[in-house]
Image (spheres, helix red, strand yellow):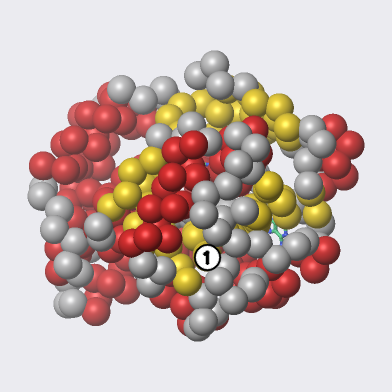
Amino acid sequence: MSVKGIKKIAIVGTGAIGGYYGCKLAKAGVDVHFLARSDYQYIQSHGLKVASAKGQDISVDPVNVYNDSKDMPQCDLILITLKTTSNDQLNELLKPLLHEKSLLCSLQNGYGLEHYLSQVFPQASIIGGLCFICSQKVKPGIIDHQDFGSIRLADYNAGAERLSDVAELFTQAEVPTQTSDSLTKARWEKLVWNVPFNGLSVVLNAKTDAMLNKDSTRALIKEIMLEVIQVARVHAADIDNDFADKLIELTDGMAAYYPSMKVDYDLKRPMELKDIYQATLNAAYEKGIAMPKTEMLLELLTFMDHS
Ligand SMILES: NC(=O)C1=CN([C@@H]2O[C@H](COP(=O)(O)OP(=O)(O)OC[C@H]3O[C@@H](n4cnc5c(N)ncnc54)[C@H](OP(=O)(O)O)[C@@H]3O)[C@@H](O)[C@H]2O)C=CC1
Ligand SMILES: CC(C)(CO)C(=O)C(=O)O
C-alpha cells in the first residue's frame, strides 16, 4: 500500500510509539523500515508485536529491521520516534535515509522540534505529528498498547498536499488521524497535557488517576495547565482556559497511566526535560511571562534526573 509518492517509510526509533505506528503501517501493507538499537537482534529473529488492551494486537514477522541507518534504503517519509534526548544524533542517523523529496515528521513530544529539524536539514520538507496514545515497550520487540492511538498532523513547510497524503496513509492503516491548520497550536495543546502530568507523575510517583482523585493535585494540574495556556496565547496559539478543564475530564476517562516521562525515570533513563520543560519556559521568558509552578517543577525534575 502506498499513497502518491509515499512508498518507503523509515521508523527511526523502534520503541513505544515507533513500534506501534510502524506495525500499523506494515500490517496495512506499507513498505516500512525500522531502525532499532538494543532489541535489533530479537526483532530480526522474532518480529515485532503489539499487545493491545484495546483488542488491536498486531504481529509483524519478518520485519525490515536495521541497527545502522547506513544499511537502510532512502525513504519517502521518515518518522522520528526516538526520545528527544537522542535528537543530537538525528543528523548522523537521518542522513543516509534522505533523498531530495523525503518528508520528515517528528512524532515526539516537545516544543520547537520542527524548527530544530529545519536547522539541521535546511532542504528538508517537514510536517509535525502529535500522538495521543498510551503505550510502552515492555520487552524486546513487544509493545504494550494501553489506550488511544490517534495522530494529529500539521504542516511546517511541506505544503497542504503532502500533509494530506501522509494523513491518508495513516488513515488507510486504520490510525484515527486528524490534520490541523496550525502546528503551533497543536504542539501547545499537547504541552498543556504533558507539562503538568509528565513531571508531576515523576515527582509524586503517581499515575494520572491518583493525581486527579486528590483535590490539591487536581487543582495544581489545572494551575500548571493555565500557565502553559497563557504562554501558548502569546505565541499565536489561540487556546481558551476551558481547554484545561476539557483535558482534565478527558484524563478522568483514561485508563490509569504513567506518562512516558515516568517510565523513563523508573528505568533510569534521561527525561525529556529540555524539549518539554526548558523549551516551554524559554518561550515564556522570551515574552516576559512568569511560570512559577512550571519552573519549580523543572527544578525538582532536574534534581531527580539520572542523566
Ligand atoms: N510512549 C507513549 O505513550 C508516548 C510517547 N510520546 C513521545 O514519543 C517519543 C518517543 O517516546 P517512546 O516511544 O515512549 O520512547 P521509547 O524509549 O519507547 O522509544 C524510543 C526508541 O528509540 C530507540 N533509539 C534511541 N536511540 C537510538 C539510536 N541511536 N539508534 C536506534 N534506535 C535508537 C530506543 O532504543 P532502545 O530500545 O535501545 O532504548 C527506543 O526503542 C517521545 O518524545 C515521547 O515523549 C508521545 C505520546 C505518547
Ligand atoms: C498524553 C500522553 C499520555 C499520550 O499521548 C503522552 O504524551 C505521554 O505519555 O507522554
Q: Quadrant of residue 242?
A: top left
Q: Is residue 160 above or below residue 24?
A: below
Q: Which residue is mark 1?
A: 103
Residue sitting at 65 percent across and 26 percent down? 58
Q: Nearer the viewer, residue 90 or 261?
A: 90
- Seen in the picture, residue 207 relative to 295 is either above or below; the reply is above
Determine if residue 271 is in view. Answer: no
Q: Is mark 1 within 8 Å of ligand 1?
A: no
Q: How many marks?
A: 1
Report the front residue among 276 and 187: 187
Residue furthest top as drawn: 55
Viewer-nearest residue: 207 or 114: 114
Q: Residue at x 51, y 54 (%)?
A: 4
What x and y, as percent, mark residue 42?
85, 39
Quadrant (top left/top right/bottom left/bottom right) for the N terminus: top right
Check the image and report above or below for 230 versus 18: below
Please indicate whether residue 232 sits to the left or right of residue 127 in the image.
Answer: left
Q: Residues within 10 Å of mark 1 (few under 14, many from 20)?
A: many
Residue type marked 1 = Leu
Q: Find residue 160 and report its horizontal and vertical position in percent.
A: 33, 62
Q: Residue at x 47, y 71 (%)?
A: 125
Residue 243: quadrant of the picture:
top left
Describe the element under mark 1 as helix, strand or loop.
Answer: strand
Q: Quadrant of the C terminus?
A: bottom right
Residue 41, percent from left and from top: 87, 44
- Residue 300: percent from left, percent from top: 42, 56
Residue at x 15% of width, y 63% of height? 233
Using the rendered image of the protein, determine whether residue 49 is visible from the camera's viewpoint: yes
